[in-house]
Image: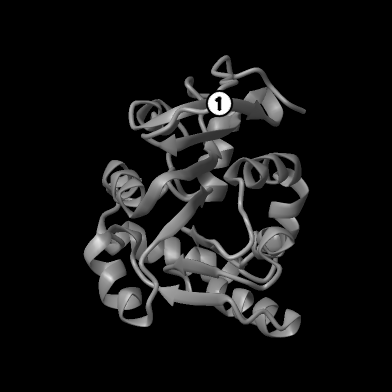
Amino acid sequence: MDGTKEEQEKAIEYYDKISGIYDFISNWYYRNARKYAIEKLKIEKGQTVLNLPCGTGVNFKHFQKYLENSGLIIGIDLSKGMLEQAERKTEKNGWTNVDLVLENATTIDQIWFEQNYKSNGQNKVDAVFCDLGLSGLPEWQNIIDNMISLLEPNGRFVILDWYLEKSSMLAKFVKWIGKGDVDRPIWQYLKTKVSDFELVKFGVFNGVFVVSGTKKGIKPAGNRVDGSPHK
């Protein structure tokens, strides 16, 4: 999807409709990849985590294991249905550190962040998690660049998404389900932007990937860049 207005409107309508069952699908297929990805964020108590798109807030309970209702979770999505589910989770669990935002991902940059958070004393993002969104969002390279610009020096950036090189029944099915493009070179692009880059693959035919990296600065030891699969 190139992200025309019509395509975006159809995608929003689609995700509004499936918001009630999204958690079941997501928790079933992406459980191992999600667990690994969130570990790679290296979240610490009191930090700020930006989740784009945040969907139904399926990641929030995992973030809270580290944050313990401290710091700030900024959840951004363009589907009202998804955000309504995320709001229900937030209220049910009594989380006071979650801020849900209905916004187009392409508008999230330093200016947007300063206008919305700096006046409240919030001037940093320690970790960014983009899961199952960049394969469908328009201007995905710019989104990655903007997310990196928001990060603190040595902040963590993790992406969970699909990548299938060849056209196949699986690729067509995933594109139909997710309304995105499964052959975008997302992890290849991130590799050029961060240090401490790591790629690990999951799922059927290793079509799901988790990539992580650090905003360029001090480079930790112990990289793995071979993409060895995890089941």
Count numbered badges in the picture.
Answer: 1
45 or 54: which is nearer to us?
45
Above/below status of 28 relative to 102 = above
Using residue 56 as the reference point, say whether residue 13 is left or right of it.
Answer: left
> In the image as oriented, which residue stretches furthest toward the top?
226
Amino acid identity at mark 1: Leu
Residue placed at 61% from the left, 69% from the top? Answer: 19
Indicate the quadrant where residue 161 lies.
top right
Residue placed at 65% from the left, 17% from the top? Answer: 228
Residue placed at 58% from the left, 46% from the top? Answer: 41
Residue 144 is situated, as x and y percent measured from the top left of the image, at 34, 44
Using residue 68 as the reference point, say whether residue 37 is left or right of it.
Answer: left
> In the image as oriented, which residue stretches furthest toward the front?
218
Using residue 69 as the reference point, say whether residue 128 is left or right of it.
Answer: left
Residue 10 is situated, as x and y percent measured from the top left of the image, at 40, 63
Indicate the quadrant where residue 227 lies.
top right
Residue placed at 48% from the left, 20% from the top? Answer: 166
- Disc 1 secondary structure class: strand
Q: Which residue is mark 1?
A: 199
